[in-house]
Each structure stands twice: as C-alpha cells, then as structure tokens.
Image (cartoon, helix red, strand yellow):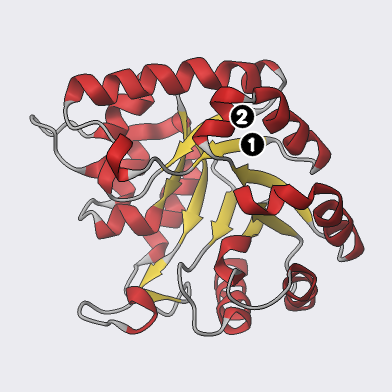
Amino acid sequence: MATIAYQLYCSRNFGPLDKTLAMLAKAGFTATEGYGGLYDHLDALKAGLDANGLTMPSGHFAIDMVENDPARAVQVARTLGMDKVFIPWIHPDQRPTDKAGWAALGARLARIGKPVQDAGFVFGWHNHDFELVDLGGGETPLDLIAAAGVDLELDLGWVGVAGKDRVAELKKFGSKVKAVHVKDRAPAGTSVEDGWADVGHGTTDWAPIKAQLDALGVSHFVLEHDNPADDKRFASRSLATVKGW
C-alpha cells in the first residue's frame, strides 16, 4: 500500500505546528515528512503526531547533523518512527563546481550516511535542480552522487524545472529511488506561488510517471509545494489527486 505523506515545510508560514497537524488529519493524511527545525522540539513533535494519528516515515536532516552528530540524527529518526533519512540541501558556497568535486561529495555522503544505515535506516539525498546540470558528456551531479552508493529521494518537481524527463530519470536511477517528492508546476511564466501548483492542478502529466513508479515498486510519495498561498487547499486537493492514482 502506498504511503502518501505531507512535507511539513509546506506549512511553515501557517501558524503553530499543532494547527497544521490537526489540519492534515482532518484532510485525510496519515503520514508526514519532517525537516530540521522541527527536531528542536522532539517530544512535542512526537506528541502532536500521535495525538493526530499521524506518522513520520521519513525526514530531512541537515548535512552538518548527520556528519557531526550521527547519534543525534539516529535518535531523532528513532523517536519519530522514521525508516528513511534524507539530506536535502547543501549551501551554494559549499557546492562543488566540477565532476571531481561532485564525486567527492558523493563519497562524503556515502561515508557520513553509514552510521545511519548501520542503525537500520535508509539513507539518501533529496535533489533540487542544481544537481541536474550537465557537467559534460551528459553526466550530472546527481549521477555522481548515486554512483557513490547513495540512495535518492527524487524530487520530481525539481527534475522538471531542470528540464529533465521525469520518466527517464526514474528509469535511470531505478532501485536507487526510495521515495519521491510529488510536486506540480504552474504554466510557464506564472509567478504566483513561485510557479508551483497543487498536485494534479498544474502542467505535469502524471500517468506515465505513475506507471514508471509502479514499475520500480516506488510507493512512498511525499506531497510538497514550496510556497502555497493556502496550505489547506494544497493539502486537500493534492491528496485527492494522489489518492485517485
């Protein structure tokens, strides 16, 4: 059975966490995905999830925490009942600029992820569009990260923004894809809500993408919108779309 989760970052501008969790439960969600800032109040987060019948099977973790305090990352993941730990970002001034640099980052990720994997969790990288630029010969930073043995939470929205074919990228990475971010784009030139749309209400043709996800056995879907004007609207309409799959 599919896991349909809500990335809590979507609601960062909409009041206290308990309000968001209650909204998600009412909308019909049973799962969420966490991100770094929420873990500072771990007990309250766990209590809020439990009170609303919600789980958190995956979370985003800062690269610094995983590298410098892996025991804390494991503690957070265990406390919240996660089974997947993803690093979602590296600051622009820390990003490599060539193939050798990205290969080195891939090796670094594989190394720092080992304690997390040894503790029983899936460990991987969540992409934006900057990991999908051509470094020469059609090779991208994400190719080099995956080649280092790092699993992926493939953000399908950013894959599209990068001008890549989502089905082709899913085929290429295959079993490395452990979860996906399900995001939709508004028509080109749309500036409202940073160009994102509710899932199923944008320009993405989801049928071939879903068919490829099924072929790969990927069933962990995280719904996300980077800047919704109304998080309740995004949550309810997007969940209805994905449940309809």
Label 2 is placed on what type of residue? Val
Q: Which mark is residue 84?
A: 1
Q: Whole-percent x and y of residue 116?
A: 64, 23
Dot 1: what SS? strand
Q: Nearer the viewer, residue 191 or 233?
A: 191
Residue 58 drawn above or below residue 63 = below
The picture quadrant where one finds residue 139 is top left
Dot 2: what SS? strand
Q: Whole-percent x and y of residue 32?
A: 69, 57
Q: Whole-percent x and y of residue 3?
A: 67, 52
Distance in Å between CA atoms under marks 2 and 1: 5 Å
Q: Nearer the viewer, residue 195 or 1?
A: 195
Give left or right: position of 67 versus 98.
right
Give left or right: position of 12 versus 28.
left
Q: Which residue is found at the position 73% from the left and 40% from the top? A: 82
| Labelled pair 2, 1 in contact (Cβ < 8 Å) | yes
Residue 10 drawn above or below residue 126 = below
Q: Which mark is residue 47?
A: none
Q: Which residue is found at the position 49% from the left and 78% from the top? A: 228
Q: Which residue is mark 2?
A: 122
On the question of residue 245 being in view, the answer is no
Upstream in sequence: badge 2 or badge 1: 1
Q: Which residue is found at the position 29% from the left and 58% from the top? A: 160
On the question of residue 51 being in view, the answer is yes
Label 1 is placed on what type of residue? Lys
Give left or right: position of 180 versus 220.
left
The picture quadrant where one finds residue 93 is top left
